[in-house]
Amino acid sequence: MRATPLDARAATAVVLSLAVLGTAACGSTQDSDEAAAFCTSVTSLADGSLLEGLDLTTVETLSADDPALVAAQDALAELEAVSAPPEVADEWRTVLTPLAGFLDALGATGADGTLDDLADALVAPEVVEAGTAVDAYASEHC
């Protein structure tokens, strides 16, 4: 059975998890390409463009090959490929892991009942704390 429509609470959880990183203003003060890539990734995640085009209110119409979902998964893969500075590497993974699970479930068949739980995981205290740490690092170093 296909997942039921994502309720407003779950959609809000997705948006809030991305907003946790929203205050970081990354610029070009970093010398290394790796650091610059991380700063760009934080900004990319924070601006919410990862979910652009996804209709999170009617997930029953999504399929694994939905162009907006594929684009979101590709963008997430790029974020996962970025090397985070050691000071926030664990936190970066903590922020991205539940988002990956959420996007995977959107395209999966038989995900009935799991999307709300996965959306809740996006705003779990440890994810919010990790997002705050990444944001603080980016604010200071980017």
Image: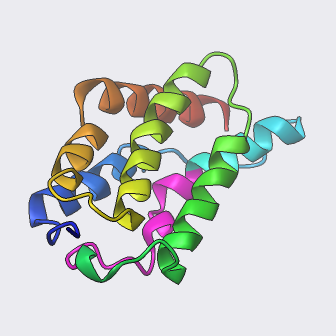
* Vertical comparison of 49 with 102: above or below: below
Does residue 52 show up magenta in the picture? yes
Residue 137 image offset from top left, x and y in percent: 56, 27
Whether residue 26 appears in this view of the structure is no
Q: Residue lying furthest top in this view? A: 87
For the point 45% across and 75% down, the residue is 52
Quadrant for the N terminus, please. Answer: bottom left
Residue 32 image offset from top left, x and y in percent: 88, 35
Residue 99 image offset from top left, x and y in percent: 42, 47
Residue 133: quadrant of the picture: top left
Residue 28 image offset from top left, x and y in percent: 78, 48
Tell me which segment is drawn in magenta. 43-58
User: Looking at the image, which is closer to me, 62 or 138?
Assistant: 62
Residue 62: quadrant of the picture: bottom left
For the point 11% across and 66% down, the residue is 8
* Vertical comparison of 119 with 121: above or below: below
